[in-house]
Amino acid sequence: MSEPAVRETLLGPGLPTLVIGEGPRHLVMLPGLAPAPGQPTGRERQLATSGWEPLLDGYTIYRLNPRVRPVGTTFEEMAEDVAAAIESLDPPVDLMGASTGGALAVLVASSRPDLVRRLVLVISGIRLSDEGQRKRRVVVAAIEDGRWRRVFGEMFTLGGPSTLWRAALFELGFLLGPRLVGIPDDPTLIRAQLHAWGSYDGTDAAQSIKSPTLLIGGERDRGFPPVNVRELAERIPTAQLVIAPGIAHSWPPDAMGRHIAPFLE
């Protein structure tokens, strides 16, 4: 299959957006934690534009990146940016959020049901677990101290399904994270997102979601463990739940073709 058409644009209040494919329907994708503002580059861009094959015949995908907001900005305020961007796309659209993007997607679907046809939430949950909050505090402290190798080491461990894997990923992040991801010139965006996770709880918002919803969690995700994802699913009246076996906080490799594409038909 040939590479999909990809272009860059700005939507809503200046959200940097990758437009992938040229299908007739619109899917808005809200990615996870953003280490730096602007369009993804390098390996991050490659990951952002790949894996969409099961949807490309039917969809144009709009991958929205957040704009820089000051520390103290809530997810509710960030979700208003997303809603403004979707308004320019002839809604309702299908909306997908991963991790941090999942929290924003919940808030958009709850507050603006007119904008969302179907909702997909991947490796996200009703709130951060206690372990997730502990990790968040460690990462925030490392950012404040400028210890970026520690930041990447801690963040890379989220994808580890076992103690051994987490130890290996910490070393990988510590040694190569600055080169693989890049140290942001201004860390305000990632600090603002991590700060917002400190107080976020999606309980009330979830109960107001009307769109058919698919949740995909990881069996070994320590930030959003299965009990956390199940609680979110139980709060959404129309939810379907999938727990991917053996997966920690990373995108399940078969999720798009096996679960997401059939759900969006």
Image: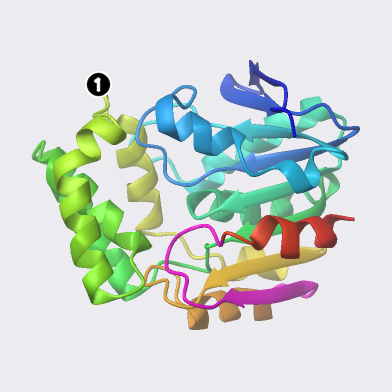
6, above or below 48, in the image: above
Q: Image quadrant of residue 230?
A: bottom right
Q: Is residue 214 visible?
A: yes
Residue 181 in the magenta stretch? The answer is no
Residue occupying the point 69% across, 32% down: 62
Report the residue that reaches farthest toward the front.
1
169, above or below 38, in the image: below
> Which residue position holds label 1?
185
Q: Is residue 81 visible?
A: no
Residue 135: image x %, image y %?
A: 25, 62
How many numbered discs, if any?
1
Q: Nearer the viewer, residue 136 or 218?
A: 218
**Where are the magenta residues, as a range?**
236-252
Residue occupying the point 75% across, 34% down: 1
Q: Image quadrant of residue 253?
A: bottom right
Q: How is the rendered protein coloured?
A: rainbow
Q: Image quadrant of residue 158?
A: bottom left
213, above or below 16, in the image: below
In-image side of 259 versus 171 (left or right): right
Residue 84: image x %, image y %?
A: 69, 30
The quadrant of the rendering that contains the C terminus is bottom right
Q: Nearer the viewer, residue 101 or 23?
A: 23
Q: Secondary structure at mark 1?
A: loop
Residue occupying the point 33% across, 49% down: 195
In-image side of 67 versus 71 (left or right): right
Q: Amino acid at mark 1?
A: Asp
In-image side of 153 versus 52 (left or right): left
218, above or below 73, in the image: below
Residue 238 in the magenta stretch? The answer is yes
| Disc 1 residue crowd, few under 14, some 14–19, many 20+, Cα 10 Å | few
